[in-house]
């Protein structure tokens, strides 16, 4: 007997027809990231990837990482631009596993939305695809989930997961760091994807839509929203190119994410040394300075909040530092000598205190 009070899935807020449209809309993006090792196609219950090439390694190690974009998504939603935050999602994962020297192999994403819109989903996944192409990894799977009643219709959240591989003899390892090693910083593209709860509070809240969208001299001609939405830089290809060109040049590296230089560079140190960072030896991107001034951050607080213009800090063999810098320049990276490794206990210390904002 038919139940007169029945409720369909669509009436509950989940549109499986729009979901099918969304899958069709992202197929070309997904295929554009494929590597020869990808087996099959999207649509299965699991993504398949051959690791037969690892047989040529002495001791292959799989390296995994997972992350999200965080409240930077609120800036994207405010600006109505959804094709860049996917780059951030991939960047946060692949830059993390790069700290071991790993090559990212494949990536999976999870997109939760209040109400599914296939066109918006195509833009979001388009950004994820661009991030995967920049990193050289394949987008082999993912999930799109509607959460009616839990999220607002226009709201969405992103998370992702990547797997890479590194041969143990070539792995970057904090235990190889030595006193006298050189710190080389790689320029960030801005705030990347960290500190946005603070950045939004001091840069966005209380400003009119017109003020947020107008070009500003103190942001090098960008608006506040544009500057805050600049995608995270992906460092995989240039750093791995240096590892090939200058073997043993990079001993370890730190991805400067949430917690800033203070709470990330120490993760690349053994317990017997400190990293001594010379403040004032690299320029601050306009958006970083703008956010710090808007929040009236002290130097110490800024250094453990934002990346302060350095997306990665490499710890480099001093005998190979010039070769590493030359190889990075050849790859298009802007680098700065920002300090050195000294005897210590695994901490980050600063020289030229007071020079960060000079």
Image (cartoon, helix red, strand yellow):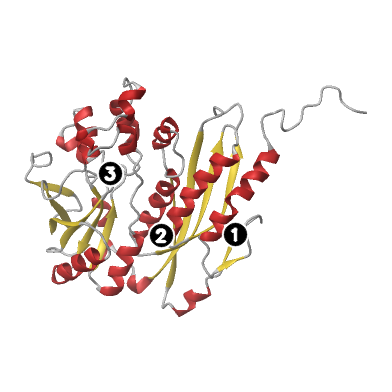
Under tag 1, what secondary structure? loop
Measured as percent of width and height from the top left, residue 146 is found at 61, 36
> Do tag 1 and tag 3 residues touch (Cβ < 8 Å)?
no
Measured as percent of width and height from the top left, residue 72 is found at 39, 37
Residue on which disc 2 sits: 135
Along the line of sight, the residue nearer the viewer: 239 or 213:
213
Please indicate, yes or no, whether residue 49 appears anywhere in the rendered image.
yes
The quadrant of the image that shows the C terminus is top left
Residue on which disc 3 sits: 190
- Residue 97 versus residue 159 in the image, above or below: below
In front of the other: label 1 or label 3?
3
Residue on which disc 1 sits: 47
Tell me which label, 1 or 2, sits earlier in the chain: 1
Along the line of sight, the residue nearer the viewer: 282 or 194:
282
| Tag of residue 22 | none
Measured as percent of width and height from the top left, residue 8 is found at 76, 30
Q: What residue appears at the point 26 percent right and 56 percent down from the top-left corner?
A: 268
Under tag 2, what secondary structure? helix
Q: What residue appears at the point 33 percent right and 51 percent down from the top-left corner?
A: 233
């Amino acid at each position: 007997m038919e139940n007169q009070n029945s409720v369909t899935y669509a009436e509950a807020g989940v549109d499986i027809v729009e979901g099918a449209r969304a899958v069709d809309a992202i197929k070309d993006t997904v295929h554009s990231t494929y590597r020869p090792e990808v087996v099959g196609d999207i649509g299965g219950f699991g993504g398949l990837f051959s690791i037969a090439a690892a047989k040529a390694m002495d001791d292959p190690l799989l390296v995994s990482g997972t992350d999200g974009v965080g409240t930077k998504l609120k800036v994207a939603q405010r600006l109505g631009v959804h094709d860049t935050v996917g780059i951030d999602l991939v960047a946060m994962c692949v830059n993390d596993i790069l700290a071991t020297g790993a090559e990212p192999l494949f990536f999976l994403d999870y997109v939760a939305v209040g109400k599914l819109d296939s066109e918006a989903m195509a833009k979001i996944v388009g950004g994820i695809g661009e991030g995967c192409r920049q990193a050289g990894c394949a987008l082999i799977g993912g999930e799109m989930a509607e959460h009616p009643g839990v999220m607002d219709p226009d709201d969405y959240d992103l998370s992702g997961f990547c797997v890479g591989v590194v041969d143990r003899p070539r792995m970057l390892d904090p235990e190889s760091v030595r006193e006298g090693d050189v710190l080389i910083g790689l320029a960030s593209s801005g705030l990347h994807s960290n500190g946005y709860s603070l950045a939004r509070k001091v840069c966005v809240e209380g400003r009119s839509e017109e003020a947020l969208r107008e070009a500003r001299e103190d942001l090098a001609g960008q608006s506040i929203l544009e500057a805050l939405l600049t995608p995270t830089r992906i460092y995989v290809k240039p750093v791995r190119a240096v590892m090939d060109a200058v073997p043993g040049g990079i001993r370890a590296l730190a991805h400067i994410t949430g917690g800033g230089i203070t709470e990330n560079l120490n993760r690349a140190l053994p317990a017997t040394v400190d990293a001594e960072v010379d403040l004032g030896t690299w320029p601050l991107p306009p958006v970083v300075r703008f956010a710090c001034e808007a929040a009236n951050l002290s130097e110490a607080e800024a250094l453990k909040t934002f990346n302060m213009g350095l997306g990665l800090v490499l710890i480099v063999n001093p005998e190979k530092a010039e070769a590493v810098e030359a190889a990075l320049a050849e790859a298009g990276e802007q680098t700065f000598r920002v300090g050195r490794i000294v005897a210590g206990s695994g901490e980050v210390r600063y020289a030229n205190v007071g020079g960060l904002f000079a």
